[in-house]
């Protein structure tokens, strides 16, 4: 088996092939071969670290999404309070008084809560919505124009924001020190290239009837990966050449 994983295979590709190889070995019983078993366990362990590292790099996307959801919740809160304020100018005095009553509740919960920290903002939103659900308050809310609809929108946007926020907090609380994906990728690739493949080559030469099939499976996985990576690298080189020519 001459194939080894190309160095320009990306992080995701290394992670995928390592998972696939571990899965292939788990289909058989290699417990009698302590060396091979050790390599498989090492590959599985280091690839698990790579998976966590990849997930960690995606946190930036989650943070961006969190900012977007926060902005939506902020806008819904501002819209809600503006509707209430507008109702204070109604010519129907009863409704205008009801709006002023609701405005006092908003003020008591901080009408600028959308400018506060995430945690404080969520706590005040919970308090506000709870107050608005009180029977005597809800009756006043229902009398106002467009306000109940804005409360529904505020509930929904706040729930979406808080759900992602809580998820991120839990993930960060359980997260250990993370190795950079590029560094961990090399570790996983080296286990395959420098430990697993050389060992399988020796094993096939000694006991081909026992190791030849799994060695061929490993080789097919690697060749498929290398073909994909090589095609991508060729496209990238062609693109760079076109750019250089046109500059």
Image (spheres, rainbow, N blue to C red):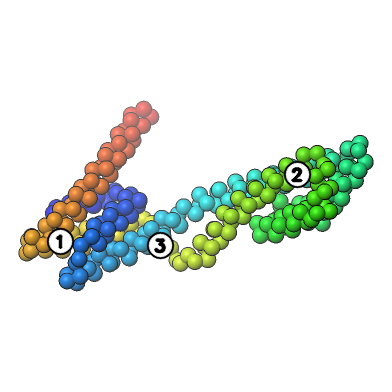
User: How far apart, in angstroms, are the residues tagged by discs 2 and 3?
Assistant: 49 Å
Question: Which residue shows up at 63% across the image and 52% down it?
Answer: 159
In the rendered view, tell whether residue 81 sits above or below residue 15: above
Question: Which residue shows up at 54% across the image and 63% down it?
Answer: 170
Question: Which residue shows up at 28% across the image and 63% down it?
Answer: 43
Q: Earlier in the sequence, mark 2 or mark 3?
A: 2
Q: Which residue is mark 2?
A: 148
Tag 2's secondary structure? helix
Q: Nearer the viewer, mark 3 or mark 1?
A: 1
Horizontal side, residue 140 vs residue 79: left or right: right
Picture quarter with the C terminus: top left
Q: Which residue is mark 3?
A: 179
Horizontal side, residue 247 vs residue 194: left or right: right
Tag 1's secondary structure? helix
Q: Nearer the viewer, mark 2 or mark 1?
A: 2
User: How far apart, in angstroms, are the residues tagged by discs 3 and 1?
Assistant: 29 Å
In the rendered view, tell whether residue 38 sits above or below residue 76: below
> Measured from the top left, where is residue 68 in percent x and y?
60, 46
Q: Which residue is mark 1?
A: 200
Q: Is residue 187 visible?
A: no
């Amino acid at each position: 088996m001459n194939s080894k994983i190309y160095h320009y295979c990306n992080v995701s590709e290394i992670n995928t092939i390592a998972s696939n190889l571990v899965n292939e070995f788990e289909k058989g019983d290699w417990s009698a071969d302590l060396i091979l078993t050790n390599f498989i366990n090492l590959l599985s362990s280091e690839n698990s670290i790579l998976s966590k590292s990849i997930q960690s790099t995606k946190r930036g996307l989650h943070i961006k999404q969190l900012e977007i959801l926060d902005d939506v919740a902020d806008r819904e809160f501002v819209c809600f309070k503006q509707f209430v304020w507008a109702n204070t100018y109604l010519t129907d005095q009863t409704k205008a008084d009801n709006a002023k009553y609701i405005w006092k509740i908003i003020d008591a919960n901080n009408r600028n809560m959308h400018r506060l920290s995430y945690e404080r903002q969520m706590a005040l939103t919970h308090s506000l919505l709870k107050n608005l659900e009180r029977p005597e308050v809800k009756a006043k809310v229902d009398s106002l124009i467009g306000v109940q609809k804005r409360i529904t929108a505020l509930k929904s946007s706040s729930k979406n924001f808080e759900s992602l926020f809580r998820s991120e907090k839990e993930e960060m609380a359980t997260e250990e020190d993370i190795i950079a994906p590029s560094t961990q990728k090399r570790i996983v690739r080296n286990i395959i290239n420098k430990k697993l493949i050389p060992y399988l080559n020796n094993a096939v030469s000694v006991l081909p009837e026992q190791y030849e099939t799994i060695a061929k499976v490993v080789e097919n996985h690697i060749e498929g990966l290398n073909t994909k990576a090589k095609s991508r690298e060729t496209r990238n080189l062609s693109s760079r050449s076109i750019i250089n020519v046109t500059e």
